[in-house]
Image (cartoon, rainbow, N blue to C red):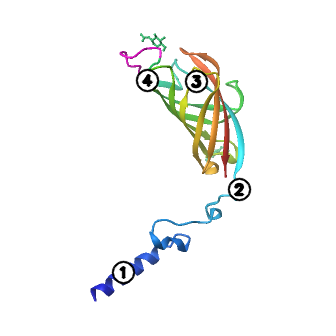
């Protein structure tokens, strides 16, 4: 009797775990949905986005702030241990007055004891046209000493679900005390 009750309970429980395919019965927690049911197209697109942003390090309205200052006992040329955050507008051109198409929000840390190098998490939050509300996420090493730095694209949301790719960034202008202008070319494969 108890065994029958248990089997019946299990049967009812399993039948509620339908997901979208029949392959779930092995484990109960994994299925193979048709990508179309998630609004994903059949083939991935490949896009090149170019954005610029401008940081203000000083004044009453900075875009980028140090949260943790450099740790004095380490070689100051590397700023090892420094942590900063930024939130500023993305524009289509290098001029701060050019059209705004989104924001960049990020967390950066100086993580090398040998050279000034950043580990970065950067979220490109787009607000323009069909991309409005979609985000592209970069995570990796920004080797500041190089003219062109490469950072992996590790994912995204909205139109950038399953995104993969890489970004190339270069500094167009820099005055470490006041402001900078940065260019990002993002090559991304996405649905
Ligand atoms: C700090 O690092 C720089 C660059 O690697 C090096 O040239 C310099 O000698 C170092 N200074 C000290 C005090 O270790
Ligand atoms: C983007 O979407 C938000 C929220 O839906 C909306 O308020 C905003 O006007 C949109 N921006 C553009 C440029 O379409």
Query: Which numbered disc flags the more N-terminal residue, 3 or 4?
Result: 3
Query: Which numbered disc flags the more N-terminal residue, 1 or 2?
Result: 1
- SS at badge 4: loop
Residue ID for mark 3 = 55
Left or right: residue 130 compared with residue 116: right
Q: Nearer the viewer, mark 3 or mark 1?
A: 1
In three-dimensional space, the C-alpha distance between marks 3 and 2, rounded to whole angstroms, equals 37 Å
Residue 169, x across and y down, in percent = 64, 28
| Residue drawn where x is 66% and y is 43% of the image | 188
Which label was assigned to residue 9? 1
The N terminus sits in image quarter? bottom left
- SS at badge 2: loop
Magenta residues, start to end: 68-77
**165 or 84: nearer the eye?**
165
In three-dimensional space, the C-alpha distance between marks 1 and 2, rounded to whole angstroms, equals 42 Å
In three-dimensional space, the C-alpha distance between marks 4 and 1, rounded to whole angstroms, equals 56 Å
Query: Which numbered disc flags the more N-terminal residue, 3 or 2?
Result: 2
| Residue drawn where x is 57% and y is 20% of the image | 145
Q: Quadrant of residue 182?
A: top right
Residue ID for mark 4 = 82
Left or right: residue 47 compared with residue 107: right
Q: Quadrant of residue 70?
A: top left
Q: Nearer the viewer, mark 1 or mark 2?
A: 2
Q: Is residue 135 above or below residue 29?
A: above
Residue 161, x across and y down, in percent = 60, 51
**122 or 60: nearer the eye?**
122
In three-dimensional space, the C-alpha distance between marks 2 and 4, rounded to whole angstroms, equals 42 Å
| Residue drawn where x is 37% and y is 84% of the image | 8
In three-dimensional space, the C-alpha distance between marks 3 and 4, rounded to whole angstroms, equals 17 Å
Magenta span: helix, strand or loop, mainly? loop
- SS at badge 1: helix
């Amino acid at each position: 009797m108890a065994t029958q009750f248990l089997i019946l309970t299990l049967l009812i429980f399993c039948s509620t775990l339908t997901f979208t395919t029949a392959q779930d019965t092995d484990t109960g927690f994994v299925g193979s949905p048709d990508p179309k049911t998630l609004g994903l197209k059949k083939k991935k697109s490949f896009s090149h986005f170019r954005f610029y942003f401008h940081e203000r390090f000083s004044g009453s309205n900075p875009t980028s702030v140090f949260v943790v200052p450099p740790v004095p006992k380490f070689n100051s040329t590397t700023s090892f241990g420094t942590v900063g955050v930024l939130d500023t507008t993305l524009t289509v051109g290098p001029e701060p007055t050019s059209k705004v198409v989104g924001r960049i929000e990020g967390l950066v840390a100086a993580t090398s004891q040998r050279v000034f190098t950043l580990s970065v998490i950067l979220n490109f939050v787009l607000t323009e046209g069909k991309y409005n509300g979609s985000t592209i996420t970069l995570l990796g090493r920004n080797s500041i000493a190089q003219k062109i730095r490469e950072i992996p694209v590790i994912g995204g949301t909205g139109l950038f679900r399953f995104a993969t790719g890489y970004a190339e960034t270069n500094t167009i202008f820099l005055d470490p005390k006041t402001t900078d202008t940065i260019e990002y070319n993002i090559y991304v494969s996405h649905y």
